[in-house]
Image (spheres, rainbow, N blue to C red):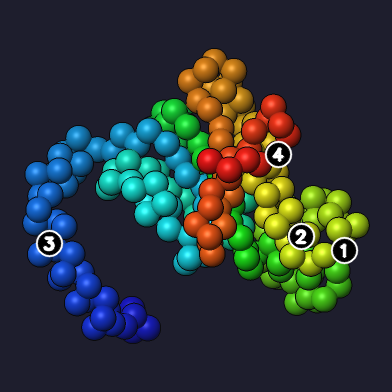
């Protein structure tokens, strides 16, 4: 593979630092994880955004969360069409193999994917409308909700509203998976919708009784 390059020095240095400290201090735990396999209690579906650090937000240890990241923390509808479905595969594995007790969908402020959807629907991002745009076709999952927010005149308010709706769209789509809806009905699985504000460190959770997000 001639196109492969050596690991950048700064990453190599960070690895050696981790190996000499965190790993060395918890070697028995890592051996146990390797021998016994993973048994996470929760799956977290979050955005690829580098500013969203799930394990830091919840103070999670290695092996505690099964984490899947994609653009705008979206879950597509159930579509057993034989195509490639990375997010759907992750959900299936988490529920049917790992048997997680919780699925958390975590949205966030200043989401570039959500903003891209707004620009696309508004006609300001023709490159995302092209059939060969992976981002554009992925954001089509959110297009109906985006169109529903067109009456919100304030750009910041619309962005934030759509970020939270992306969480709700994903939760609704999760329930279209038969093995998810069955587990929820049986009480073996619960779904949770969260949104975090990067600047303030705030965390909000969707409360169905209030039909909105409330501060944790």
Q: CA distance from mark 1 to mark 2?
A: 8 Å
Question: Disc 4 or disc 3, which is closer to the eye?
Answer: 4
Q: Relative to 174, is 51 on the left or the right?
A: left
Q: CA distance from mark 4 to mark 3?
A: 43 Å
Dot 2 crowding, Cα within 10 Å, few <14, some 14–19, many 20+: few
Q: CA distance from mark 1 to mark 3?
A: 51 Å
Inspect this view and state whether residue 119 appears.
yes
Query: Based on the displayed image, in which of its 4 quarters is residue 33 positioned?
Result: top left
Secondary structure category for the residue under label 1: loop
Residue ID for mark 2: 157
Give above or below for 121 relative to 208. below
Query: Based on the displayed image, in which of its 4 quarters is residue 170 positioned?
Result: top right
Marked residue nearer the N-terminal end (2 or 3): 3
Give above or below for 159 relative to 84. below
The residue positioned 56% from the left and 32% from the top of the image is: 191
Secondary structure category for the residue under label 3: helix
Q: CA distance from mark 2 to mark 3?
A: 44 Å
Question: Disc 1 or disc 3, which is closer to the eye?
Answer: 1
Question: As drawn, which residue projects farthest toward the right?
Answer: 151
Marked residue nearer the N-terminal end (4 or 1): 1
Q: CA distance from mark 4 to mark 2?
A: 15 Å
- Labelled pair 4, 3 in contact (Cβ < 8 Å): no
Residue ID for mark 3: 21
């Amino acid at each position: 593979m001639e196109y492969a390059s050596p690991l950048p020095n700064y990453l190599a240095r960070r690895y050696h630092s981790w190996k000499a400290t965190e790993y060395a201090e918890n070697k028995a735990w890592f051996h146990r994880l390797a021998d016994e396999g993973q048994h996470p209690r929760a799956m977290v579906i979050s955005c690829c955004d580098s500013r969203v650090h799930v394990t830091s937000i919840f103070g999670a240890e290695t092996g505690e969360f099964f984490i899947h990241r994609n653009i705008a923390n979206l879950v597509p509808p159930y579509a057993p069409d034989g195509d490639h479905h990375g997010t759907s595969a992750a959900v299936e594995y988490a529920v049917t193999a790992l048997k997680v007790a919780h699925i958390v969908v975590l949205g966030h402020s200043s989401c570039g994917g959500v903003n891209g959807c707004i620009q696309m629907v508004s006609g300001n991002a023709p490159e995302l409308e092209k059939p060969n745009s992976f981002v554009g076709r992925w954001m089509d999952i959110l297009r109906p909700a985006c169109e529903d927010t067109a009456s919100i005149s304030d750009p910041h308010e619309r962005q934030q509203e759509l970020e939270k709706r992306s969480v709700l769209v994903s939760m609704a789509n999760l329930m279209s998976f038969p093995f998810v809806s069955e587990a929820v009905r049986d009480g073996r699985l619960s779904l949770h919708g969260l949104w975090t504000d990067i600047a303030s460190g705030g965390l909000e959770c969707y409360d169905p009784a209030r039909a909105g997000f409330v501060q944790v």
